[in-house]
Image: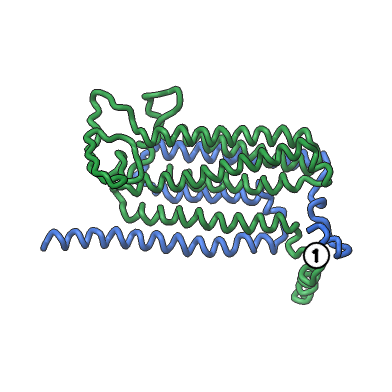
C-alpha cells in the first residue's frame, strides 16, 4: 500500500506541467553551476592534500607563516588575521541571507541596507586578501639578526642567486624548500579571491537593480536569492580553504 | 523565456511563491542569528586549537574536519535554504557531490601517502648504490 502511495506522489511531481524540484529554472541552474564549481574547488584542495601527504614533514607550518596582523607589526599573532577574515565572510553571509529574507517580505529598504553591508564585507575580505598576499610575497622584514635563506633558482630564463631571499614567488619561497607550497597558496586563495571579487561585482549590480525598483516591477526578489546562493557558496569554499590550508 | 512559460497554463510561478509575512520573518531571522552565533563559536574554537593548543597526542585533523563539515552543513541547509527545498532537489545536489568527493579525497590521500613511502624507498636505494 505504501508503495502505491509513493507512486502517486511521484507521478504528481514528475508527470509534467510543474517543476519536479519545486524551484524556478534560474535557481535550479544556479545550484547546478555551484555543484560544478564546488567540484573544481574540491579537486584543487584534493591536489593540495596529495602534495601535503607526499611531503609530510617538509611542508611549511601555516601558523608560522601567517602570523601578521595589520597595525600590529612585529607581534606574533598566529592565524589571527585569517580568523578575522573568516569572521568577516561569515558575517557578510549572514547579512546576505537577511537581504534574501527581506526580499521575501518585499521590503526594498531593508534589502538595500543588508546588500550594502554584504558588499562592504566582501570588499573588506578582498582587501584583507591583498594585504595577506603582499606579506606572503615580500616575506618577513629583514632585521639585523635575520640572515635570510640562501636561494639558487631559475626564473624567467635567468639564473638568480639570492643569499637573502625572503618571501615567495612561483618558483621559490623562504617558508619551505618546496615551491609547491607557494604555488598552492597563490592558486587556491587566488581562485577563491577571484570568486569573492566577482561576487562583490554581482552584488553591486543586484544592489543597483534593487535600488532602481526593478525587483518591485517584477513582483519578486528572486535575483537577490540567486546572487545570495553564489555568495554563500563563496563563504562555503572559504570554510574549507580555511580548514585545509590554514589550520591543518 | 517568459513567453515559453506563459504558453503552459497553470504552470506555477515559483519566483513569486517564495514569500512570507512579517511574523514568519521574525522566526526565520531568529534562526539565522542563532546559526551565526554557532558558526562564530565553532570558528573561535578552531582558531584556539590551531594557534595555541599543541596537541600532538590528539588527532587535530579529525576535530577540524568534523567542525568544517558541521559549518558546511549549516551554510548549505540554512543559509542556502536547501533544507527548505524538496527532497528530490536535496538528493540531486548532495548525493552525486558527496559520492564524488569521497572518491576524490580517498584517491588523493592514498596516492599521497604512497608517494611519500616510495620517495623514501627511492632515496634509500639511491644511497646504497
Task: Report the side of A112 relative to B129 (left or right).
Answer: right
Against B54, is A32 above or below?
Answer: below
Instruction: Give the quadrant of the N terminus of chain A.
Output: bottom right
Q: Is residue B41 left or right of residue A28?
A: left
Q: Tell me if residue B50 comes above or below residue A73 in the rendering.
A: below
Q: What is the x, y in percent for residue A239?
A: 52, 45
Across and down, in percent, residue B88 comes to 69, 64
**Residue name at image x 79 percent, y 72 percent:** A15
Above or below for A53 versus A74: below
Is A173 in front, or is A66? Answer: A173
Q: Is A129 on the left-hand or right-hand side of A33?
A: left
Q: Which chain is blue?
A: B
Horizontal and vertical percent position of residue B66: 50, 50
Chain under disc 1: A
SS type, badge 1: loop
Q: How is the image coloured?
A: by chain
Q: Position of residue A171 (x, y in %)?
A: 32, 46
In front here: A157 or A173?
A157
Q: Nearer the viewer, residue A37 or B111?
A: A37
- State the green chain: A
Q: Quadrant of residue B39?
A: top right
Residue B116 visible in the snapshot: yes
Residue beneath the point at 46% across and 37% down: B47
Q: What residue would you read off at disc 1?
A: A18
List the single residue furthest toward the right.
B9
Amino acid at each position: 500500500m505504501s508503495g502505491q502511495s509513493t507512486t502517486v506522489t511521484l507521478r504528481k511531481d514528475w508527470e509534467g506541467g510543474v517543476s519536479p524540484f519545486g524551484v524556478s529554472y534560474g535557481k535550479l541552474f544556479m545550484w547546478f553551476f555551484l555543484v560544478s564549481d564546488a567540484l573544481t574547488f574540491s579537486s584543487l584542495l584534493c591536489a593540495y592534500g596529495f602534495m601535503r601527504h607526499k611531503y609530510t614533514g617538509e611542508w611549511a607550518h601555516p601558523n608560522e607563516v601567517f602570523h601578521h596582523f595589520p597595525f600590529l607589526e612585529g607581534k606574533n599573532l598566529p592565524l589571527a588575521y585569517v580568523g578575522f577574515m573568516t569572521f568577516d565572510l561569515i558575517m557578510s553571509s549572514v547579512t546576505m541571507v537577511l537581504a534574501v529574507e527581506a526580499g521575501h517580505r518585499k521590503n526594498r529598504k531593508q534589502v538595500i541596507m543588508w546588500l550594502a553591508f554584504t558588499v562592504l564585507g566582501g570588499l573588506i575580505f578582498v582587501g584583507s586578501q591583498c594585504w595577506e598576499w603582499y606579506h606572503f610575497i615580500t616575506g618577513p622584514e629583514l632585521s639585523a639578526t635575520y640572515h635570510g635563506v640562501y636561494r639558487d633558482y631559475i626564473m624567467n630564463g635567468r639564473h638568480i642567486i639570492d643569499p637573502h631571499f625572503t618571501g615567495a614567488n612561483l618558483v621559490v619561497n623562504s617558508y619551505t624548500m618546496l615551491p609547491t607550497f607557494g604555488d598552492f597558496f597563490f592558486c587556491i586563495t587566488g581562485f577563491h579571491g577571484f570568486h569573492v571579487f566577482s561576487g562583490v561585482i554581482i552584488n553591486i549590480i543586484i544592489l543597483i537593480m534593487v535600488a532602481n525598483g526593478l525587483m518591485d516591477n517584477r513582483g519578486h526578489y528572486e535575483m537577490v536569492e540567486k546572487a545570495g546562493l553564489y555568495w554563500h557558496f563563496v563563504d562555503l569554499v572559504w570554510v574549507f580553504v580555511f580548514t585545509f590550508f590554514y589550520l591543518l | 523565456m517568459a513567453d515559453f512559460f506563459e504558453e503552459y497554463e497553470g504552470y506555477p510561478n515559483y519566483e513569486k511563491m517564495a514569500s512570507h509575512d512579517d511574523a514568519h520573518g521574525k522566526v526565520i531571522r531568529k534562526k539565522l542569528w542563532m546559526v551565526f552565533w554557532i558558526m562564530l563559536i565553532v570558528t573561535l574554537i578552531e582558531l584556539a586549537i590551531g594557534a595555541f593548543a599543541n596537541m600532538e597526542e590528539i588527532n587535530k585533523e579529525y576535530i577540524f574536519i568534523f567542525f568544517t563539515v558541521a559549518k558546511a552543513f549549516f551554510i548549505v541547509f540554512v543559509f542556502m535554504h536547501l533544507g527548505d527545498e524538496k527532497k528530490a532537489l536535496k538528493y540531486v545536489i548532495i548525493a552525486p557531490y558527496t559520492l564524488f568527493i569521497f572518491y576524490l579525497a580517498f584517491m588523493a590521500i592514498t596516492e599521497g601517502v604512497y608517494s611519500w613511502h616510495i620517495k623514501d624507498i627511492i632515496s634509500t636505494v639511491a644511497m646504497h648504490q
